Image (spheres, rainbow, N blue to C red):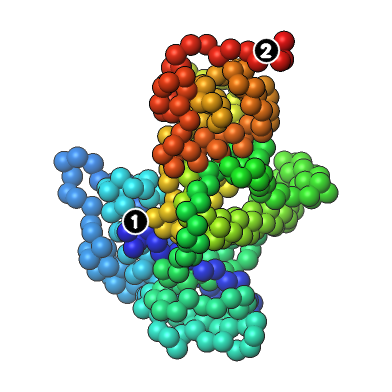
Amino acid sequence: MTVDNLIGMSRYRLQPTPAQEQMLAEHCGHARFVWNLAVEQHRHWKPGRTSAPGFAEQRRQLTEARAESAWLRAGSVTVQQQALKDFAQAMANYFGQSHRKPTWRKRGQNEGFRIVAVRPGDVRRLSRKVGEVKIPKVGWVRFCWSRSVPHGAKSHRVTRDAAGRWHVAFAAIPEPIPAPGTGEVVGIDRGVAVSAALSTGELLTAPTLRQAEQERLARLLRKLSRAKRGSNRRVKVKLAVARLKARESDRRKDWIEKATTDLARRFDVIAVENLNISSMTRSARGTLQAPGRNIAAKAGLNRGILAAGWGRLVERLEHKAPGRVVKINPAYTSQRCSACGIVDAKARESQAAFRCRSCGYAANADVNAARNIRDTAAGHAVAARGRSGLPGRTNREPHPDPLSV
């Protein structure tokens, strides 16, 4: 794992004054405008035309644009140049096939800007729970000192979410959590009903909105559907919806942080399935020529997968336990008996129940899958009827348990 992959963000809640909030919004508008101009230049390129300008040429063009536009000139050149630099890095990631092609940024979405070359004196602590960060052309902005600021942070990013909250995130390489040294291996099976089932038998579920909050969210969504586009009422309802969804997202992120820290401290090796989540959550809508089927059911499944935090769970594990996270092939992990190794699709009696028809072993279906993941990662998966523990055909059909007849 490279150093770039290990860089994490420590996020803190900003507390700007109304005047500072307006200036921060101007910075976001400048960064978005410059980014979208760079996107437009690259969208204009086609085979046979002159190549799109690089970062050096775009920076020169930005200098000319600032001389002609009073609105751009009033903003911070650091913010605007960094937006171009971020775009250049995004294009490099796209050509390196590690990320998607950068696209347009919209007002109210992806609001934020980045500041680099942060000096130690640009961040200071005022009291036990309050700190300040220096932002160009804004001055000192207070933030909630919820934990220590990472030492040696050279850049930070200021963002505004859909709920109207401002945050500052410092980029730093997080300190890995040391392994306990017990040699213990744990398998994790990620699901929708149960967010994470451990091979130890523990079932972990990501928190969601409470029943009253879910009912209020449903009422707000109905009210939003009736509100006229562009009206003040629609703006207020959208903000109320965003605040509820932000509350759910915050709870999920907090749960992931606590769960991954606990796992990194307890186990030497953490085994998970190698899942392509972006493909699994792709829409089933299809096209006009080939429309999809069961679209509503697939959309509900996609929402369940995203609400369980599958991707972020593994990402944070890799940050906190680098080199100790093992990804295995997910084939047949939910159909194989972790006791005898027989692969039988009918052994899973329901979403939660697994009962082997050969040896009679019964357990929670997700826990059984987690134990298969653990055994595969540890290199001692149970052999099935003289065969290896790897997925494949069994030698013969599993025999029913005579005691159950």
* Label 1 SS: loop
Residue at image coords 42%, 76%: 153
The residue under label 2 is which amino acid type? Pro
Which quadrant would residue 191 be assigned to in this image? top right
Foreground tag (2 vs 1): 2
The residue lying toward the viewer, choosing from 209 and 354, is: 354
> Which dot marks residue 402?
2
The residue lying toward the viewer, choosing from 327 and 163, is: 327
Is residue 284 left or right of 96 when viewed as pictured?
right
Which quadrant would residue 378 be assigned to in this image? top left
> Which dot marks residue 401?
none
Instruction: In the rendered view, tell whether residue 338 sits above or below residue 185.
Output: above
Residue 231 in the image: state x and y as whole percent.
Answer: 70, 52
Residue at image coords 61%, 45%: 200
Residue 354 in the image: state x and y as whole percent.
Answer: 65, 27
In the displayed image of the protein, which residue is found farthest to the right?
Answer: 212
Residue 115 in the image: state x and y as whole percent.
Answer: 42, 73
* Label 2 SS: helix
Which residue matches tag 1? 1
